[in-house]
Amino acid sequence: MENKDLKDGGTKVNRRTFLKGAVAVGGAAAFTGVPGISRVVRAQAKKPIKLGGLFSLTGPHSTESDDQRKAVQLVVDEYNKKGGLLGRPIEFIIRDDKLSAGEAALKAKELTEKEKVDLAIGTLGAHTVAALNIECKKNNVPLMSINQTDDLNKMPDWGPYTFHEGFTPYMTAQAMGHWILNNLGKKWYFLTGTWMFGQQIYSSFSKFIAKYGGEQVGRTEYQLGSPEFSVYFPKILDTKPEVLITTGFGKDFVNQSKQMTDFGLKGKMHIVFVLFDIIMAKEAGQANFAGTYGGAHFYWELQDTIPTAKAFVQAHMSRWGHPPTAYGGYAYSGAKELLGAVERAKSLDPEKIRKQIEGRSYDNYKGKQWWRKCDHQSMQDFYVIKGREPKDVKKEWAFFEVLGKTDADEKLERTCEELGFKG
């Protein structure tokens, strides 16, 4: 799926758009004078600010990644409807990394060197965002990362203009680990992917369980996008775990949850998906993930108690016809932080943008968050949720119930010194 021409439809300025704008300017000047020209017309006559977006629009995580694209588009549209940013339209330039590190490197280079984007946002994979970060650092392009990775906020991968809106796998393991030990059991088996996120999650959970008195009884690895998982289940059953922790996400979640149900795994152990989200849950079917547990940094029913969550959910529902995913939340908040920093700085100077984000507290969609100054890591709340039984689903998309919450705390993450920062 090639997206070279996929741009924000309301912001690209071509000859026809310019001529229409010129006619509008002439008419407005004739009847109302130059001050009567609309902000939008004035913005369209100026060189656009280019926001490059790298997303995994094909592959096993394509649906979740496309929801990130939709969420960024909401923010871009908000700005363009009020006249743009710094009086200029925002041009949203999108590329598909196909959830491939090699493809991500090519598309990141295209965004930074050919399109010469002013700002960048993306991508869903820990391995794909690493490639994007390399190119952004090389070209001094401020990057907002909207995924889970342990690398971007540590030396030497960190960059002065790199910001990480997502959790790190280390933080996720810390936020979930105590709840699992206290509520589900101490004997854990791991079913983990071979790509970067799967490896980082396993590393963090295994350190946690060793520190806090749990027991690892086994581990099986699988390839991203595998269609068949039941071949692993006899080995898992032989170890008699109390808890099975899996990194299944996107299409892998769909396949795993269906096959675990068919095989009868749910009745023999507690199943914990490290990350839950709503679109993949809809595809899997309520009965297949009912009774299983998962982690989430956001769930749309938080709108019942958090005003900013309600505003985000309603805007997303109005535009796209369904509630946002949690990963869409990363993208929405990340885009707001990146573009908002430009607005407050009144400049595209990366150093001025940096100063507007470092140490800042904010609430874009889920309650209070803040940026740790040393590593540009966002601190935020985390939730443990559970799949509802089909009979308990009272409204569309209400797939989960929230069981527990871990409050935002810098102690969930490695210290600045551990990450390679001095002082």
Image (tube, rainbow, N blue to C red):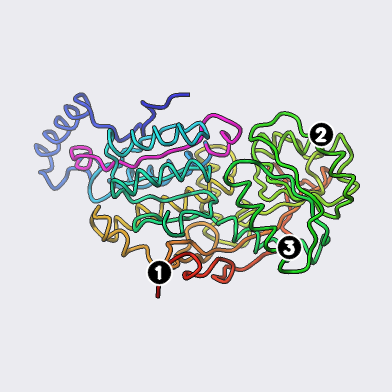
The residue indicated by pointer 1 is 359
Residue 355 versus residue 74: which sits nearer the camera? Answer: 355
Task: State which mark lies toward you, 3 or 1.
Answer: 3
Mark 3 burial class by Cα count in 10 Å: few <14, some 14-19, many 20+: many
Residue with the mark numbered 3:
209
- Could you tell me which secondary element the residue under label 1 belongs to? loop
- The crowd level at tag 2 (other Cα within 10 Å; few <14, some 14-19, many 20+) is some
Q: Are marks 3 and 1 in contact (CB under 8 Å)?
A: no
Q: CA distance from mark 3 to mark 1?
A: 31 Å
- The amino acid pointed to by label 2 is Ser
Q: State the residue at coordinates (84%, 44%).
A: 236
x and y percent of residue 38 in the render? 22, 43
Observer-nearest residue: 125 or 87?
125
Q: Which residue is mark 2?
A: 230
- Write the start and end of the magenta stretch as one range: 42-65
Q: Per the image, is 303 magenta?
A: no
Q: Viewed as shown, does residue 262 lie left or right of 136?
A: right
Q: Amino acid at mark 1?
A: Gly
Name the side, left or right, on which 65 lies relative to 233: left
- The residue at the point 88 percent across, 44 percent down is 237
For marks 2 and 1 on the same chain, the one whose residue lies earlier in the sequence = 2
- What SS does tag 2 mark? helix
- Name the image quarter holding residue 174: bottom right
Residue at x-position 66% and y-position 42%? 193
Q: Position of residue 106 (x, y in %)?
A: 39, 32
Distance in Å between CA atoms under marks 2 and 3? 26 Å
Circle 3: residue type: Ile
Callout 3 secondary element: helix
Q: Is residue 46 magenta?
A: yes
Q: State whether residue 313 is above or below residue 31.
A: below
Q: Residue furthest bottom?
A: 423
